[in-house]
Amino acid sequence: MNKIAFLGLGIMGHNICMNLLKAGYPLTVWNRSSKRAAPLVKAGAQKAATPKEAVADADIVMVMLSDDAAVEEVVFGPDGVLEGVKKGQVVMDLTTVSPKTSLREAKAFHACGVEFLDAPVFGSRGESRDAGLWIVVGGKKKVFDKLAPVFQTISATQHYMGPNGKGSMMKLVGNLLVAMQLEAIGEAMILATKAGLDAKDVLGVVNVTDFKSPIFAGVGDALARRDFSPNFYLKLMLKDANLIAQLAEELNVPIPAAAVVRETIKGAVNKGYGDQNASALIRNLEEQAGVQVKYQD
Ligand code: NAP
C-alpha cells in the first residue's frame, strides 16, 4: 500500500488520519504542536520531527492546515515540504486556501517533478470521523483518478472540478452557501424567539418543509441547546469569508448578502467568539436583538 505522510493534526486532520490507519495505510504524521501526534502514534502512525522529514519516504503527502499562512510556513518554509519532496510523489492540500495559493503550490511542486492536487473538503468533525466528507479536487484528472482509493477512504463523494485552483474555488463557492445558511437560521430563530414562538415548534416546521437543510437542522438544534463547542472554528469561517470576498473582488462579482454575513462574522470574532463553533456568529445577531434562542424547559 502507498505510504502516506500527513501534516496538520487539527480537528479534521486527526480524524482523517484515523481513517487512513484503519484502512491499513502506512502513515507518518507531523504537527506543529507535537503532542497532537500522540493518539495517532498509539494507533500505529510514525511521528516525524519536521515536515521535510515526514515527506521523505512517502508516496503521497497530505496537508491539512488552518490557512494560507500555515501553508506558507509548512510547505514553503525552512524544513518544509518542498525541501523534502522527491520526483514521483503526489502532494494534495486539503486546507481551505486562496486559489492563488493552490496555483503557487502547484507550480512549486511541478518544478520538483511532484504532482499536486488542491483537494479541500466539505463536511465537518462528524463527517471526517465517519469518512463521510465531500472532496472537491483541482489538478490533473489522471492524478485524481490514481488517488481515488485514498479519497474513497476518507470521503463519501469525490468531485473533479478541473485544473489546479478549481478545487479551492469550488470550496469557496460552497462556503459562501454555508455562511449564508448560518446567518439565515440565526436571523430566523431570533425573529421567531422575539415573536414568542417556541424554538422546538419552529424547528419542527423548518426541518420538514421545502426549505429544510441539514445545516438548519444541526445548527438550529445546537443553538437552542446553547452548544457552541467547535466543530469548525468561527475564526476559520472568517478566514473563508475573507477568501470569498477576495475571489469575488478579483472577478468583479457582487456578493452583497455574503458581505453582510462577513460583517456579522467579523463582529462575532471581535466579541471573542472566534474559538467557538462557526454558528457562534449568531451570538452577535442575538446581542443586537437583545434575545437568546433556547429551548423552553
Ligand atoms: P484546526 O483544528 O484549527 O487545525 C489547524 C491545524 O493547522 C493544526 O494542526 C495546527 O497546528 C496547524 N497550524 C496552524 N497554523 C500553523 C502554522 N503556522 N504552522 C504549522 N501548523 C499550523 O482546523 P481544522 O478544523 O482541522 O481545519 C483545517 C482546515 O480545513 C482549515 O483550512 C479549515 O478551513 C478546513 N475545513 C475545516 C472544516 C471543519 O469543519 N473543521 C471543514 C471543512 C474544511 P497546531 O495544532 O500546532 O495549532
Image (cartoon, grey):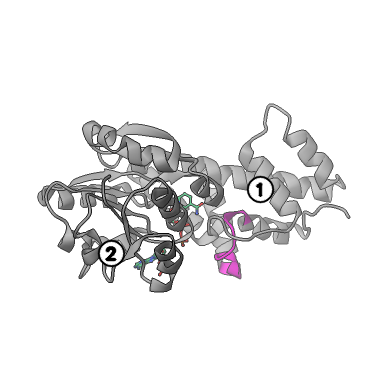
Determine whether the residue tagged by mark 2 lies in a helix, strand or loop. Answer: helix
Q: Is mark 2 within 8 Å of ligand 1?
A: yes
Q: Nearer the viewer, residue 225 or 284?
A: 225
Residue 74's tag is: 2
Mark 2 neighbour class, 10 Å CA radius: few under 14, some 14 to 19, many 20 or more: many
Determine whether the residue tagged by mark 1 lies in a helix, strand or loop. Answer: helix
Above or below, comparing residue 9 to residue 151 in the picture: below
Callout 1 amino acid: Val
Q: Quadrant of residue 267?
A: bottom right
User: In the rendered image, which quarter contains the N terminus?
Assistant: top left
Q: Which residue is mark 1?
A: 219
Q: Which residue is depicted at the point 73% across and 58% down?
A: 226
Q: Position of residue 69 (x, y in %)?
A: 33, 63
Q: Nearer the viewer, residue 261 or 227?
A: 227
Q: Quadrant of ligand 1?
A: bottom left
Q: Which residues are magenta?
A: 270-279
Q: Nearer the viewer, mark 2 or mark 1?
A: 2
Mark 1 neighbour class, 10 Å CA radius: few under 14, some 14 to 19, many 20 or more: many
Q: Which residue is depicted at the point 38% across and 72% down?
A: 34
User: In the rendered image, which quarter contains the C terminus?
Assistant: bottom right
